[in-house]
Amino acid sequence: MTAPFPTRKQEEWRYADLDALQPVWEQFAEPLTLTAGPGESFEEVWLPTADDVQIRRVQLALEANAKGRLFVLNTAPVYGRIELEVSLAQGAEFELFGANIGTGLSTNEIVTHVRHVGESGRSRQVIRSVLNGKATGSYLGKVEVARGAQKTDAEQSVKAMLLDRGATANAKPELEIFADDVKCAHGATVGELDAMQLFYAESRGLPPASARALLLEGFVAGLWDSATDGEAIAEAARNALRKVVG
Amino acid sequence: MLEITNLHATVADKPILNGVSLHVPAGEVHAIMGPNGSGKSTLAYVLAGRPGYEVTEGSVTFIPTRHPRESGGPAFSADQEQRDSRLRGNDDRDLLAMEPHERAAAGLFLGFQYPVEIPGVSYLQFLRESLNAQRRARGEAELSGAEFIKLAKSQAALLGMDAEMLKRPVNVGFSGGEKKRAEMVQMGIMQPKFAVLDETDSGLDIDALKAVGAGINRIMRAPDKGVLLITHYQRLLDYVEPDRVHVLVGGRIERSGGPELARDLEREGYAEAAA
């Protein structure tokens, strides 16, 4: 039985492209479940495909002292959604490094719900969006610290770069904390390319489009630094940025 | 090689340059001195084409002289050189009509007073892409990664800069002095025809000042090159002897003279010297 089709009234679907989702919903309704057993580590790189609509819905359970690390790139031409529900048992660590790179009328979103269930868990989410035209890029991230999940350390860093007036970035880090000895940091910024950086690069001989591409590459570059094998995703991100700069 | 005529410029509709005229012939270093707010940095930015710096009157002509052995190509024959010199008139460029990157490709270099930080982009990548963009624009062959790294390392060494620093993001975490040294490394890599150096001496200790001064002499002291050295103080001029010194006050050149003028200014102050 397929889950009911989402509505925009549901906060986590608020910015979604439901028209694009409708025809493929049955295919994606059931989330994929992943588990990392006690003390295990896993790392995955999720590269975009060529499909117009790309949806990944994943439930990830990190058991005691497990480590999970995800590198995701969301560049669907019409609608891309990366949806993660993560639970962290005692001492578990979760890291997400993700980018939305969107052109034209596309909607790309990263939606996370990170639940710290046990003590001393650490989660870190770093999201960068680069958007042109009338593209939308969203990050909706809820961090929940359960009663008793003391010493939780949760961090969310969300930055978006808008290249055109019509582009939209939504950044919504959200905290729900039921423990009193925790560290939860979040920051969100939305901006444009720095005029002085652009001038500096152009004064060294880079034509404006190359200068923009280089600065944007720098903006997302740090995301893949800690990947064991980050070359493929870095290259895919560079290609996506080239399209965004035009 | 750089001819500035009656240059007027505004920033945010406020007039800053009020008729600057200045001629720097090839082979010369000219210093521009002047009090705070006299328009020195504005002049530098106008020459490099910074957006928002509006030229309202006047002209700037840039005549990059040709070097017979540039770009590693075969040496020109005497005939060819003669033909080149006859064509040289066609090389006159209306600097103000060019985009900033075109000015760089034509051989203009601006040494920034406050070099800009670019997180996430390594110095090596930044400079290699910049240099190759210039070379493409001039119809020269691009440098391979290996060729570029060799060039960058040798230029860093000549300025006493640890080449490892070039692996770091552009100017991020560099001290004020390191940034200025890095500007000179960039200049050594780009080998411009004409350099406008905006307070390259500020924030430098004595050792760094010597290294930067030696760098300017080594890279830019040549019969076919020119330098406009913008500075507050005489001290850099102890290492880079200017051919001419100009005093900029209120957006105009109030006085010009030989190297001795810089020493007079140091002694008397701007108010007296400009009077």
Image (cartoon, coloured by chain):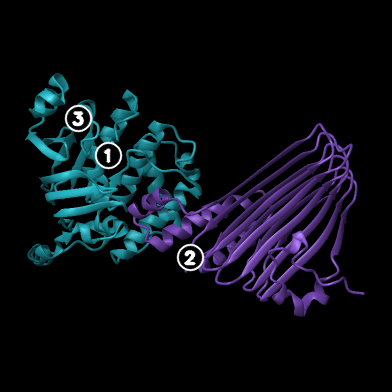
* Residue found at x 49% / y 61%: A163
Residue holding disc 2: A245
Say what amino acid the circle numbered 2 marks: Val
Residue B11 on image: x %, y %: 27, 47
Q: Amino acid at mark 3?
A: Leu
Foreground pick, A120 / B166: A120
- Left or right of A85 on screen, residue A131: left
Binning the other alpha carbons within 10 Å of mark 2 as few (below 14), some (14 to 19) or many (20 upward) gives some
Chain bearing mark 1: B
Q: Position of residue B96 (x, y in %)?
A: 21, 57
Q: Which element type, helix, strand or loop, lies under badge 3?
A: helix
- Circle 1 — which element? strand
Q: Report crowding for label 1: few under 14, some 14 to 19, many 20 or more residues within 10 A (C-alpha).
A: many
Disc ID at residue A175: none
Say whether residue A69 is visible. Answer: yes
- Which chain is in cyan here? B
Q: Which mark is residue B198?
A: 1
- Could you tell me which chain the residue with mark 3 belongs to? B
Which label is found at residue B237? 3
- Output the letter for the chain in purple: A
Q: Is A4 or B92 nearer to us in this picture?
A: A4
